[in-house]
Amino acid sequence: MSSTNRTRQRASSVEMLLLRDRLGLRRYRKTAARDPEKRKLLLELALKKIAKAEVADFIPVGFRKRRVRFPAG
């Protein structure tokens, strides 16, 4: 059994996605490889865009923030 108290290194999302790409754990294995520098730049831009869009999904409730949930239908 692994210890739940073990501290893990915090790596950026871009670093982890680039590592997966280098190890061959891609979404589509038969795609052409992209230039690593260009890929890193595009990943950073995409993650910034996602973070910017998610900022509006949270509302302050007291001293904490809660995610807004819209009922289906």
Image (cartoon, rainbow, N blue to C red):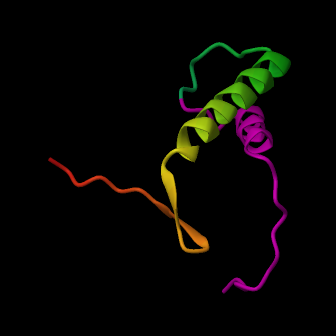
In the depicted structure, whether residue 12 falls above or below residue 40:
below
In the depicted structure, whether residue 9 falls above or below residue 16:
below
In the depicted structure, whether residue 65 falls above or below residue 69:
below
| Identity of the residue furthest to the left in this view | 73
**The N terminus - image quarter:** bottom right
Residue drawn at the location 57% of the way across and 19% of the way down: 30
Q: Nearer the viewer, residue 67 or 59?
A: 59
Q: Is residue 13 left or right of residue 11?
A: left
Magenta highlight on residue 18 = yes
Q: Is residue 68 left or right of residue 11?
A: left
Q: Nearer the viewer, residue 30 or 61?
A: 61
Q: Specify the quadrant of the image occupied by residue 26.
A: top right
Residue 29 percent location from the top left of the image: 58, 26
Magenta highlight on residue 14 = yes
Q: Specify the quadrant of the image occupied by residue 42.
A: top right
Q: Is residue 22 left or right of residue 63?
A: right
Residue drawn at the location 65% of the way across and 28% of the way down: 46
How many numbered marks appear?
0
Residue 34 percent location from the top left of the image: 73, 15
Part of the protein shown in magenta = 1-27
Residue drawn at the location 79% of the way across and 16% of the way down: 38
Residue 11 percent location from the top left of the image: 81, 53
Q: Nearer the viewer, residue 46 or 18?
A: 46
Residue drawn at the location 79% of the way across and 26% of the way down: 40
Q: Specify the quadrant of the image occupied by residue 51.
A: top right
| Identity of the residue furthest to the front in this view | 62
